[in-house]
Image (cartoon, coloured by chain):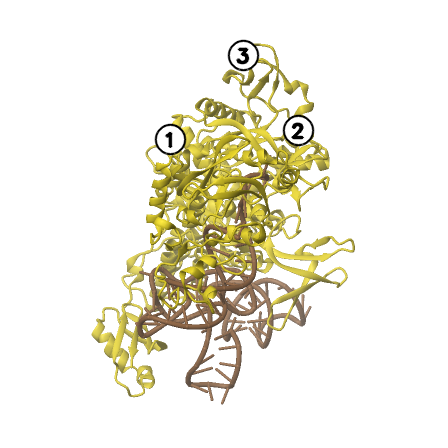
Chain colours: A yellow, B brown
Amino acid sequence: MQEKYNPQEIEQAAQAHWQSTQSFRAVEDPTKPKYYCLSMFPYPSGKLHMGHVRNYTIGDVLTRQHKMRGYNVLQPMGWDAFGLPAENAAIQNKVPPAKWTYDNIAYMKQQLQSLGFAIDWERELATCKPEYYRWNQWLFLRMLEKGIAYKKTQVVNWDPVDQTVLANEQVIDGRGWRTGALVEKREIPGYYLGITQYADELLSALDTLPGWPERVKTMQANWIGKSTGVRFAFPYELDGKKDLLWVFTTRADTIMGVTFCAVAAEHPLATRAAQGNAKLAAFIEECKQGSVMEADMATMEKKGMPTGVFVEHPLTGEKVEVWVGNYVLMSYGEGAVMAVPAHDERDFAFAQKYNDQLPPIKPVVVPEGFSEASDSMVPAGQGLIAPVIQGQPPNKSWLIDWHHDWAPCFASQGMLFNSGKYDGLGYEAAIAAIAADLKAKGLGDTQVQWRLRDWGISRQRYWGCPIPLIHCDTCGTVPVPDEQLPVVLPEDCVPDGSGNPLLKRPDFLNCTCPKCGKPARRETDTMDTFVDSSWYYARFASAGAPTMVDNRAPYWMPVDQYIGGIEHAILHLLYSRFWTKVMRDLRLVSYDEPFANLLTQGMVLNHIFSRRTDKGGIEYFAPEEVDLVRDEGGHVTGATLKADGSTIDYGGIGTMSKSKRNGVDPQALIEQYGADTARFFMMFASPPEQTLEWSDSGVEGAYRFLKRVWAFGHSLQEGGVPPRLTFPEKLPADLAALRREIHLNLKQANYDLGKMQFNTVASAAMKMLNALEKAPKTGDGRDAVVAEGFSILLRVLSPITPHLCHALWTELGYGADILAAAWPEPLDEALVQDEIELVLQVNGKTRGSVRVPAGADKTAIEAAAVASEAAQKFMEGKPAKKVVVVPGRLVNIVA
RNA sequence: GCCGGGAUGGCGGAAUCGGUAGACGCAGCGGACUCAAAAUCCGCCGCCGCAAGGUGUGAGGGUUCGAGUCCCUCUCCCGGCACCA
């Protein structure tokens, strides 16, 4: 055994050992409990980044720990290989996306292997391979048959110069990223998957996922957005034709306060009204410009224009004008809303803006408890209406005069007034009564509405899974027959940014119609890459099967632990759940949910340094290029460039990214310190769910600790401490204390592992080493305590730093392979103590401690506490009014 | 804008059920070893104070013998918002 810790050498040796023994090959074995541990597979962007290292180390710690606990473990790895960055790289370097992708995969695979992850590489897959994506196509055809997949128009970002569809991220400040042209909204046909058909189950089944973080479930529930409300219609007549304007609202109780209606620019009524109204037509066109992103829709200035069309209030018969509003979404509900400015913030803002063109705001709800006679309308502290009444008599007639210029809006639930027969009703009673009346008139009913929209999967892009359809002049759109699958994507195209290169590939485009045999044209749209990632976990469990999944899937599925970034909390995870349910309904699988437990890991952050360039752009600097400037308190206030000492801006802490130049290359780290140091730092720096801040000196600290572990192991070997010894009947006090310390930390480590709080597991390991290094040099049973302690330390640490622990375990003769060792459990005999220390408080303030026998009862503890010197001093001669004893923890004297 | 999350020393973070705030580590300071440096080892280390003690978990209020933890109000930061993955 070498004296010096040499990570490169021991890591290579350990990896060679795992390879030769096929340690991580997963074989189905019904006699053992299984543990399927899956980390979200990477997009092969070029090289691993720290987020990957963190994600996969978390998975590896769980995998190795469960292996040692006797589980049959599967940890696979693959590549989310289709996607936009490959096309961007192609535009830049004129390399086919396929070649770029495969090169990246080869490099990143080697990086993953050098980190020593316990991966079964025989199950590796890449979603850009026909043997994988043929099953995307196959399942898509099944969905088409079942009516889950269907065709509809979709709104996309259109670059008029490049004549191409842009992704949201390719739209910068409303302009195309390459051309700078103003982006337009355009409607084109596309394919959708009916995820809304599963909305109810996707929502209710969240309750069957106790192993998911509550916040992720809440986010999904809000995304699905079930709301119960009333769908009703305003009758109207336009150009002699009678029609109904349908709207949906969750606030039917405010229906008597409607002052206008608003429809989306794409609404048929808007289109009809615009005929012969050039000004309105122009406004509708304007609404169709700009972003398709919800965030932009929500933050942009609310604009509208009257259509001149009046509809009839379904209950009062009053005339209500219809407006076109840029804030009304065609894709939600009916694409039309009733507007009640008095009780809806958005309507209120709109009404204030168009004050002079709209009727006065009509309030119809007051807070519960309001009465005309009372002096104050609202109980103090509720404050929503309170400002309105300053200097005004709080009475009904005044409220009716309430006007939008200056009155705030009351959007909470309350009691109806100013609403005719509904006066005095509360929220629920009012809605029930109003819905019943609308129903009686045949103009509406209660309805459940979902925020969730169907999943548009068509992408007008090359590097994706071809949608298996054929367009025939005679037969229309015809599905590709199963026996002709997969529709293989040619791998030698080089996109240039001006549209889908498949359109220039006659060998791909031209085909014969499966129905009539005439020449036909292949669909060139490809699938959203979220399709690829919606079922890869099931394919891992059936690697290489000649069908989509085979009979190995039921053994492994569902995934016992899924690990990935919080940024996937909604889309990827929801789509995977949906896909699973579709597969289940096709009887391909029998489970309802793909991921039993979910861990969402935080992002890896680093400092950001930049300065403005002469041209007005921003230039970023890597952290190693700068020196930090701190104020007296030690806070970072700025930075200077190492090269020339010039001052640059400190941009705080942000996610590592190529564009900000604040990434740290894992490769350099592995080469300098070894994989174990990288892994240890990642686990130690913060708990998995939180963000992790990069720190070079933190890495140094991790390395220092591993060197100490090695040195301690070396000293045991030098000192001839045998791996196993018997303990004497009773240990001397100092050795008993040491042993207790080790087992206490083991108990803590096991508890924290259960919570997946690996940073404190690492801390516990460090505390064990700190204790072992201070071990007495002599004493009866000394070697036994130290050998036992170190063997516990190695096992606890081995999932985090497997190479180091593997080497020391065998070198010191603890066993042939630490992977085969039993996971350690704390022993009661090591934890017992005769006397315990309790915190002493007087009037809630800590004033010292008292020692009492371990079995002391409450009376004895009280007596000991009151009698103590510290208690006497701070009680200042007053008698104890009350003594609170928290068993095993503290005693508080109230004087 | 909407939805979700977060804020604790100079820094990363710990505190399991409301019970010693700051474990463990980094940085810093002092010392040992060395011709010297690196590496390593020992000690100190929230803030104010000579000390006794006081004070302190983003801000303000509340509940409690006792609050980082529970309740109310607010500020700032981060993630998602359906064509980035």
Nearer-the-camera pick, A104 or A680: A104
Q: Which residue is mark 2?
A: A500
Question: Residue A121 appears at what percent x and percent y?
Answer: 51, 34
Chain containing mark 1: A
**Mark 3 or mark 2: which comes first in sequence?**
2
Task: Tell me the CA gap for discs 1 and 3.
Answer: 37 Å
Residue at 50 percent of width and 18 percent of height: A482
Which label belongs to residue A420?
Answer: none
Figure check: A726 above or below A61: below
Q: Which residue is mark 3?
A: A515
Task: Tell me the CA gap for discs 3 and 2.
Answer: 27 Å
Q: Secondary structure at mark 1?
A: helix
Q: Which amino acid type corresponds to the residue marked 3 in the rendered image?
A: Lys
Question: Residue B14 appears at what percent x and percent y?
Answer: 43, 61
Q: Which amino acid type corresponds to the residue marked 2 in the rendered image?
A: Asn
Q: Could you classify mark 2 by the number of other residues whose Cα lies within 10 Å: few (under 14), some (14-19), or many (20 or more)?
A: many
Q: Which residue is mark 1?
A: A554
Figure check: B1 above or below A158: below
